[in-house]
Structures are given as structure tokens and as C-alpha cells.
């Protein structure tokens, strides 16, 4: 990470059906009934959104429901909502309108729709390494191209009861979306296997894997799905970011 602001693409994952716990808290609130509620994830790789298989939150992290305007409510950390309020998201500059404050665990099992993904509905699942201090505190998961996302999804598939999830919530396969000369069409799974990474606790190995996959994807990757199929990732990245923003499925978020 360099000096100066980091530009993320914010991705809006619309709530389709609350988890049992969230339903108890929010399902009967009249002020939420007519609203569009979104988990907002921050990503550096908008071109990978075709491969989303789920959405991650930290179970111990505090999240808020924030009123953005008359129609829309965002779920993210307070820190991110405050930054957004200073970036022109709220009606009044710097004003944060928080409707609820809950731990991430409440959301596990919530069904959402992820923009551009081949899967029409995906689930909110727990990840151990989500930082409350980065992005929105919500991470959208692309196991084909993110070693962190891949290994976390494998952990969840292996030990659903330990993570307190239903096996069906993690029953999604990585989608081949980018072709690379060195690691094929599923770069993250291929590098994780090559480096014999076993779980999301292998932090050092994962950091290396992340670097390898990121570089190969960015410099040598070609899109094999979606609106810019056949284009190099280097060109597709900005085009897909613009597509997400112009269709209001995403937005630019700086920090
Ligand atoms: B990336 P940087 Cl396919 N805690 O998006 C932990 N990780 C977070 C986070 C948080 N609070 N907020 C965002 N991130 C993840 C896609 C992706 C990402 C792919 C490959 C690599 C990759 C799908 N997940 O990131 O520290 C998000 O995951 C590798 C760096 O600001 C976001 O982009 O550089 C990235 O980390 C931002 O990390």
C-alpha cells in the first residue's frame, strides 16, 4: 500500500432475505419495509465481480444500517459511513444517519444478490481476517482470483458446523473468469494448491499467494466471461468499474 488515498469500487449487494437473527431485528420494522438495503463491499478488482460466490463479514465487527437517502440503506462500518458522508453520499455533508448497530454474526446466512455474478443469489458468510479498519468492513468473495476468499470458502465447506453455517450456504464453486498463462483459469485455487495452503490461518503463505495471483491476473490475464470477454484485464478493469458505476450497482469510494 502506497502513500495517499486508495480508490476502491464499492459494490452494492442487495438484501433478498434476512438471516433468522437479522429477520428478528429488522424484519418487522416499518421504516425498513419500503427500502432497498445493501451490503456495500470495497474491492480493488471490479473486473472480478463476475466470479462472486458469497459475501464476507467479520462476526465480531460492529456494522451499522445507514440511511443514505429516501430509498437506500447501506450496511458497513461506521467509519466507512462517515467517510462516505464526506464524499457526497449523504444529503447533508458529513452527516451520518445510523438506524441500527449490530455485530456481523447477526447477518450470517442472509441472502443477497451480487452484481454481475453468475450466481443469482449468494450468502453472507464469516471470514476471520476481515479488518474493521479497511474499506467498508464488507468483503465480496471471488474465490477464483483471491487466495483469501478461496481458502476461507474451503474452510467453510470443510467445517460448516464449526463456523455455524448451513453447508448449502457455502455450496458454490469458483467460477473461471480470467485466463492466465501461469495459473490457468482458476488462479487462486491453483496457487493455493501449489503452495499447499491449508486454511485462512496461513497468513504468510496467503500474503505471498495474493501477490502472485494479483500480478499475474493484472499483467497477463484475459477476461473469459462477461461484457469485455477477450479483453486484457488491464483494459477491462476500468471499463467494468465504469459499467458498475453507470448502472448504479457500484460507486467510487476513497480512503
Ligand atoms: B479484493 P488493500 Cl479477486 N479486510 O476484492 C480484509 N480484506 C479486505 C477488506 C477488509 N476490511 N476490505 C477489502 N478487502 C479485500 C476482490 C479481490 C481482492 C480479488 C483479488 C485480490 C483482492 C474480491 N475479494 O485483494 O489492503 C478486498 O478483496 C487483494 C489485495 O486495500 C479488496 O480487493 O490493498 C482488497 O482486500 C483491498 O486490500
Image: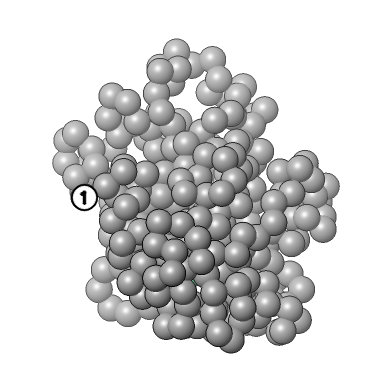
Q: Residue 230: image x %, image y %?
A: 43, 69
Seen in the image, is 130 located left or right of residue 134? right
Seen in the image, is 27 located left or right of residue 32? right
Q: Name the residue at the front extreme.
A: 230
Looking at this view, is 107 or 185 the one in front?
185
Q: Residue 149: image x %, image y %?
A: 61, 63
Q: Quadrant of residue 18?
A: top right
Seen in the image, is 94 located left or right of residue 208? left
Up/down of 214 relative to 228, above or below = below
Q: Name the residue at the left extreme.
A: 93
The residue under the point 31% across, 62% down is 239
Circle 1 sits in a helix, a strand or a loop, which is it? Answer: loop
The residue under the point 46% across, 83% down is 220
Residue 90 is at least partly visible in this image: yes
State the scheme by which the image is colored: one colour
Up/down of 231 relative to 255, above or below = below
Up/down of 69 relative to 120, above or below = above
Q: Residue 10: image x %, image y %?
A: 37, 52
Looking at this view, is 125 or 60 the one in front?
125
The residue under the point 65% across, 80% down is 191
The residue under the point 74% across, 62% down is 154
Q: Quadrant of residue 2?
A: bottom left
| Count of labels in the image | 1
Looking at this view, is 73 or 63 the one in front?
73
Residue 211 is at least partly visible in this image: no
Judging by the rendered image, the residue that carries numbered circle 1 is: 87
The residue at label 1 has a CB less than 8 Å from ligand 1: no
Q: Residue 68: image x %, image y %?
A: 30, 34
Q: How many neighbours does mark 1 have within 10 angstroms: few (below 14), some (14-19), or many (20 or more)?
A: some
Q: Quadrant of residue 228?
A: bottom left
**Which image quarter is the N terminus in?**
bottom left
**Which image quarter is the C terminus in?**
bottom left
Amino acid at each position: 500500500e502506497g502513500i495517499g488515498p486508495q480508490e476502491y469500487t464499492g459494490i452494492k449487494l442487495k438484501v433478498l432475505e434476512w438471516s433468522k437473527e437479522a429477520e428478528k431485528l429488522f424484519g418487522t420494522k416499518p421504516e425498513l419495509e419500503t427500502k432497498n438495503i445493501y451490503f456495500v463491499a470495497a474491492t480493488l478488482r471490479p473486473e472480478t465481480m463476475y466470479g462472486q460466490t458469497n459475501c464476507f463479514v467479520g462476526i465480531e465487527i460492529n456494522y451499522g444500517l445507514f440511511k443514505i437517502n429516501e430509498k437506500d440503506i447501506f450496511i458497513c462500518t461506521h467509519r466507512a459511513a462517515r467517510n462516505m458522508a464526506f464524499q457526497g453520499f449523504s444529503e447533508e455533508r458529513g452527516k451520518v444517519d445510523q438506524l441500527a448497530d449490530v455485530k456481523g454474526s447477526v447477518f450470517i446466512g442472509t441472502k443477497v444478490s451480487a452484481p454481475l455474478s453468475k450466481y443469482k443469489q449468494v450468502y453472507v458468510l464469516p471470514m476471520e481476517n476481515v479488518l474493521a479498519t479497511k474499506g467498508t468492513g464488507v468483503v465480496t468473495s471471488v474465490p477464483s482470483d483471491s487466495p483469501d476468499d478461496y481458502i476461507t470458502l474451503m474452510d467453510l465447506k470443510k467445517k460448516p458446523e464449526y463456523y455455524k453455517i448451513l453447508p448449502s450456504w457455502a455450496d458454490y464453486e469458483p467460477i473461471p473468469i480470467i485466463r492466465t498463462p501461469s495459473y490457468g483459469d482458476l488462479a487462486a485455487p491453483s496457487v493455493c494448491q501449489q503452495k499447499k495452503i491449508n486454511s485462512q490461518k496461513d497468513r504468510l503463505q496467503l500474503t505471498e499467494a495474493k501477490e502472485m495471483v494479483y500480478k499475474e491476473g493484472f499483467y497477463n490475464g484475459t477476461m473469459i466471461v462477461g461484457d469485455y470477454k477477450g479483453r486484457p484485464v488491464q483494459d477491462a478493469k476500468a471499463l467494468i468499474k465504469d459499467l458498475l458505476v453507470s448502472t448504479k450497482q457500484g460507486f467510487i469510494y476513497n480512503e
